[in-house]
Amino acid sequence: MTDQSTISTNPIVEVSEEWTINAAASAVWNKVCEPCSLLEWHGDVATCDRSFDDKGRLTRDYVMRQAGEHPAISMHEVELLRSAPIMTITYIVDVQNLPVLNYHAQMTVTPVSQGVCKARIRSRFVSDQGNAPGFDAQDFVSKFYIRGLSRLCEIMEAG
């Protein structure tokens, strides 16, 4: 018998953003696969530290700049999978100051044609609105992805 008090009624949220970039997929992959290159291609990120956890997995800790009334957000990501052949990184994320739980994300770079690719970030998490009434985590995450992909596109297309 399942204890009903342990079942979450919070919604599972999926966010996916994709950007077409006029640059070789391998060049874009090389830019995004270094964890703290985020400082170069995402203007929302103020600090980033790369390390390894006690299981030897690559991690990054970064702090986003404060946005409006929302406090600065700290994120700790643990890389679960990195595949250069399919240009994909999958990670779990522990987020401070954002009403989300069980946050899993993936970044993929896909060749479209010679000199053109698509960069996609997608995630899935549980919205924990009880900790931040009125805050739309899905919208916040989506806009964070869009700002990052837009800047990545600008950098890669500028050469």
Image (spheres, rainbow, N blue to C red):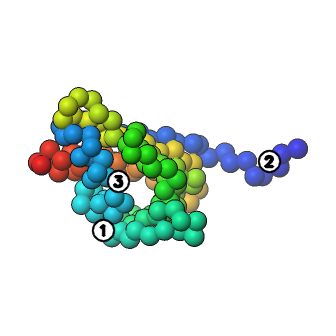
Q: Earlier in the sequence, mark 2 or mark 1?
A: 2
The amino acid type of the residue labelled 2 equals Gln
**Residue 129 visible (yes or no):** no
Q: Are marks 2 and 1 in contact (CB under 8 Å)?
A: no
Q: Nearer the viewer, mark 2 or mark 1?
A: 1
The amino acid type of the residue labelled 1 equals Ala
Q: Are marks 3 and 2 in contact (CB under 8 Å)?
A: no
Q: Secondary structure at mark 2?
A: helix
Mark 3 lies on residue = 33
In three-dimensional space, the C-alpha distance between marks 3 and 2, rounded to whole angstroms, equals: 41 Å
Q: Quadrant of residue 119?
A: top left
Point 18% across, 35% down: residue: 115
The amino acid type of the residue labelled 3 equals Cys
Point 51% across, 62% down: residue: 57
Q: Position of residue 45 (x, y in %)?
A: 31, 63
**Residue 87 visible (yes or no):** yes
Q: Nearer the viewer, residue 125 or 113?
A: 113
Q: Nearer the viewer, residue 133 or 82?
A: 82
> Which label belongs to residue 4?
2
Q: Secondary structure at mark 1?
A: strand
Q: Secondary structure at mark 3?
A: loop
Q: Residues within 10 Å of mark 2 (few under 14, many from 20)?
A: few
* Left or right for 61, reference 132: left
Q: Residues within 10 Å of mark 3 (few under 14, many from 20)?
A: some
* Left or right for 9, reference 107: right
Point out the residue furthest to the top here. 113
Q: Nearer the viewer, mark 3 or mark 2?
A: 3
Is 66 above or below relative to 26?
A: below
Mark 1 lies on residue = 46
Point 11% across, 48% down: residue: 158
